Amino acid sequence: MTNYIGKSVKRVEDKRFITGQGKYTDDIKIPGMVHAYILRSPYAHAHVKSIDTAEASKVPGVISIITGADIPEAIAGVPCGWQVDFKNGDTMKEPPHPLLVRKTVRHVGDGVVLVVAESKAIAKDAADMIDVDYDVLDAVADPKAAAQSGAPLVHPDAPGNLCFDWELGNPKEEVAAALAGAHHVTELDFVNQRVIPNAMETRGVVAQYDTAYDKYTIYTSTQNPHLIRLLMCAFVLGIPEHKVRVVGPDVGGGFGSKIFHYTEEALLVWASKHLNLPIKWSSDRSEAFLTDAHGRDHASNAKMGFDKDGNIVALQATTYANLGAYLSTFAPAVPTYLHGTLMQGLYTTPKVNVDVKGVFTHTNAVDAYRGAGRPEATYLLERLLDLGALEMDMDPTELRRKNFIPAFDGVEQEGYQTQVALQYDSGNYEPVLDRALEMVGYENFRKEQAAAASSNKILGIGFSTYIEACGIAPSAVVGALGARAGLFESAQVRVQPTGKVSVYTGSHSHGQGHETTFAQIVADRMGIPLDDVEIIHGDSDSVAFGMGTYGSRSLAVGGSAIVKSIDKVLEKGAKVAAHLLESSVDDLDYADGKWTVKGTDKSVSFGDVSLTAYVPHNYPEGLEPGLDFSSFYDPANFTYPFGAHVAIVEIDKETGAVKLKRFIAVDDVGNVINPMIVDGQIHGGLAQGIGQAMYEGALFDDTGQLINGSYMDYCMPRADALPSFEIDRTVTPCPHNPLGVKGAGEAGCIGSTPAVVNAVVDALWKAGYKVKDVPMPMTPERVWTAMQG
Amino acid sequence: MIPLSFNYKKANSVDEALSMLTEDSKVLGGGHSLIPALKLRLNSVETLVDISKIDAIKGINDNEKSVTVGGGATHASIAANSALASAAPMMAEAAHTIGDIQVRNMGTIGGSIAHADPAADWPAVLLAADANVVIKNKDGQREVDIDQFFTGFYETALAEGEIITAIRIPKTGFNSNSVYEKFKQPASRFAIVGVAACGEMDGKTPKSLRIGITGLAERAFRPMEVEKALIGKELNEANIDAALGNIADGVSVMADHYASEKYRTHLAKVYTKRALLRLV
Amino acid sequence: MKHKISVNINGKQCEGEVEGRELLVNFLREHQSLTGTHIGCDTSSCGACTIHLNGAATKSCTVLAVQADGAEVTTIEGMATNGELHPLQAGFKEEHGLQCGFCTPGMIMTAADLLKNNPNPSEHEIREALEGNICRCTGYHNIVRSIQHAAKNMNGVTA
């Protein structure tokens, strides 16, 4: 029965992509379609005094020019999906996020005027002729600065620019007392800089209103079409959900940035009916820099206390988290429940307190980006551990071992209850570190490093042993934590009369390869050929419901929902088979696509049972025809992948240029369905995590302008910036889902960043520069400056 | 992604192109400086005169005293040219560092120096090479010594209505011993600092020495004092270090978010030293 | 003013009328419905729009459509012959060189230019050759393997 699971089956979706037949949103053309361009604010904070569209409306080919005043008052804006309240019980500040601004622009790129024309070129030409008179106001882009008294206010009803002030873990006094009694305290001020997801396909929307059926169709570059439909229908436009079809077609990467319900989606849908025309909007890259939700952007202080043997005694973390000007769909959850809850790490730290202030600034929204909160937590912990080891002159791997939570499988041994709300499902942490050290050749490396310490090219090694919570999420748990929706997943397994199988999943693939891995599960469990299975996703008219793909949830949650439906299909199939075989269900075995009467050669195939189920003339009494089941799966817990990442760097002492020489990653993502695809997910995550450490970072000036908002300035790693990765796995199955899987999409991005920075600090430290931190991204100048003392 | 409207005119010869040029027009060569600016509407033009189809200015000719590189020669064709490989190896070395494969296939040397981006590679190389720029206008042809060509920030000696038809690289003892060292801005691939150096050597001592530096200042330049200080002196670390002190004298050093004035100046020294040591 | 152009695209002569300012990528996508060529940026940086113009890898976002008049253009749609995948296309599938697929056409077109000029590239040469193509999904690891796979097959050695 294991023909497919665990094998590197080549991806079935590849054919359309390698031949240029993928269908992304901007590839979609509808007869009569017109084009939208959105004129955006060039200022981070200003009052709109007047908008003169007279000249623009004369441009031949212009169809309509719409400002905020043209949009009905009842359409207040797009909502937030998560509520995180103040620690004193006050409600989170939740200012409206209008589709187009009416009076005040709050970030560069805030939408001001929608121009609809026969072509995008005409729309853009016309937009250039619109004269918006702004009264420019002071702006603030940095979260810590925004929280200081006297800072320009983003929203008048959010004093101090505070959205929430939140805390988790042991009481602060207890943590302070433990730190006071510590043998050594390692303390660092961190900036986990803002990074820009930069999916290679920019966002786009095509919206159409059909008067004949009173129905809307919207194609949008999204990670979760159903959630967009729900939010847009119920909370923005007030249109009936059954009259809206949302399709997430082929999507060119998301990394979190395409989870959220963006203003352009609702704006285009509204305009498509208002004008009774199909409309397309596709974001330019420059526009994407200013309108996509960004990630990270934390300013933190953290203290980790150790006893004289190196045992961690306490951790205090204090963070200012930038939320941007408006609350994006998941924004409040990221720096709180996806960040504070991970502060236990892999360690037995007895006292942990996390204090997070969510702050509004005059910048575009900050929300989930690959890892979402967990990379920030990991960065903080793992930087403190490597730095603590340097300060205490201990080996960083030994320091970790001392503090690792002992192995537990979640079956024989209970899950591990942390100080910060979570209960880890299963874990076995030493083997990943052992394997990584073996791959590195650790002893040898330290010798090479010592030999190079006095040369012009110094070497360093950095570690990161991370844990993350994914498989998002147990609905009751997240509900208690402020989520306004449960985070289960649905799946329908529809067996066709000929025994071919169509699977409808609420997960959405935008690179993850679900069309292959999900089919592997189905083919394996049902004992049928892979070619007999098709995975359908991304269309609210064919898939009943879904919560989409993010938080490394698709396999653990969406895959488990499929398993539930498969079980139902096989259970009913067995009844049909028993009838055909004139046997009883208990006497049947199911294997290799057929039911066999135990101990005989009497059998009936899956195909025959399927046909019988649909077109019966000989059918069990009391059993309904059909072989088609839907299921909803709500996970019992998060899943907790973990791993050990090791970076080896070489620094050119004359220039400060860092070369990443090797990167070793040993991850434990539970059971693996398709090793090739899991490897690919790890590779991609590593590149993004390394990118943050070495190259990426949004830079805002004092007026709130993004000063590196293009690919000429914002650097993502290219092929020549990265080595081939050295990766391996251990397997600690998840005890609470039927596949034993944990999730692999974010692991690479969560673990890698601190390993790289730690390696640079290690190189400098061992060469005699007692540098505690090099701010990310570690550009050559920053490293060189650190060496100048 | 959509330029403002303009008139497009394709020229089949340099003379035809010259006849099409007016004060409101621009020349389209490889297009890899101009089209990106037009797409972002950072620049606009009434008429674009396309010279990219004129074969006469694309060739690289090996002459007795020089190699003549057509203004329309692409970076890729320069990188692959055998005459230049021996006459001025820094040409191929620099060409390889420009942009990427696709950019090198289309971008031209004439277009690059006419644009005169202060971080572009060719200006440094051509300054070091003691090149001559061959320019045509309606009245005929003129040649400009490269030392007089780059006049300022995105400014050159090229006048309105003129087209660069060729660049002459003299076959000299210094050009045949030449190198290019570049510290790239990793996103744009432009030079934070690029140093072209060439010198005719007598053992470890240069009889002649020319250095071109790009990226550091508002225009590419030759650090004359450094050249002077090192001609006739052994190229070793100590002598080079002593000569590099005033590398940025008389120029206004650029700064941006990636590299400050101080760091850029430091890099210029490091990269000049690296280039010079390779001449030995 | 519109210009009549005639471009040989993937072996087929295609006619069109374009404004001077129209980019080649737009002509391919909007006029010819060849949407395999993608637009990933507006600064000629990402390489998603890479095609072959007269045999050389070119960013079709940085060429005017009118400049392609009389030229030969190959796009990703023209890489397979008689239904058989080009070795690079096969290599990308075999070695999992793509995830979301958006950068893939450009990657394949650039790699084809590399292998034409250098049939046996080292890993270092492959990585350098891809400097004008950005992938956000794969970390390039398997893209390198895919090109190596294709190089072996194109040289008659079974990968």
Image: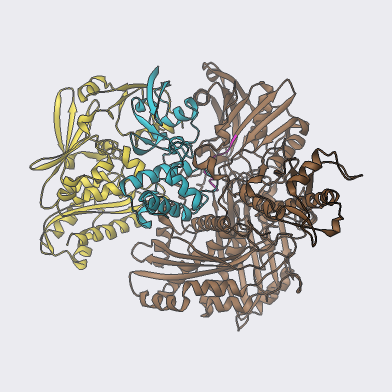
Chain colours: A brown, B yellow, C cyan
Question: What is the chief secondary structure element of the magenta stretch?
Answer: loop
Viewer-closest of A655 and A177 = A655
Q: Is residue C9 left or right of residue B223?
A: right
User: Measured along the vertical axis of the image, is residue A553 above or below residue C45?
Assistant: below
Viewer-closest of C6 and C153 = C153
Q: Is residue A444 left or right of residue B236?
A: right
Residue A452 falls in which quadrant of the image? bottom left
Residue C36 at x, y percent in the picture: 49, 36
Residue at 38% x, 27% y is: C8
Residue at 14% x, 48% y is: B87
- Magenta range is A197-204
Q: Residue furthest front?
A: A601
Residue A669 at x, y percent in the picture: 63, 62
Residue A267 falls in which quadrant of the image? top right
User: Measured along the vertical axis of the image, is residue C53 above or below residue A5?
Assistant: above
User: Measured along the vertical axis of the image, is residue A157 above or below residue A526?
Assistant: above
Residue A496 at x, y percent in the picture: 73, 41
Viewer-closest of A142 and A551 = A551
Residue A50 at x, y percent in the picture: 59, 26
**A198 inside magenta stretch:** yes
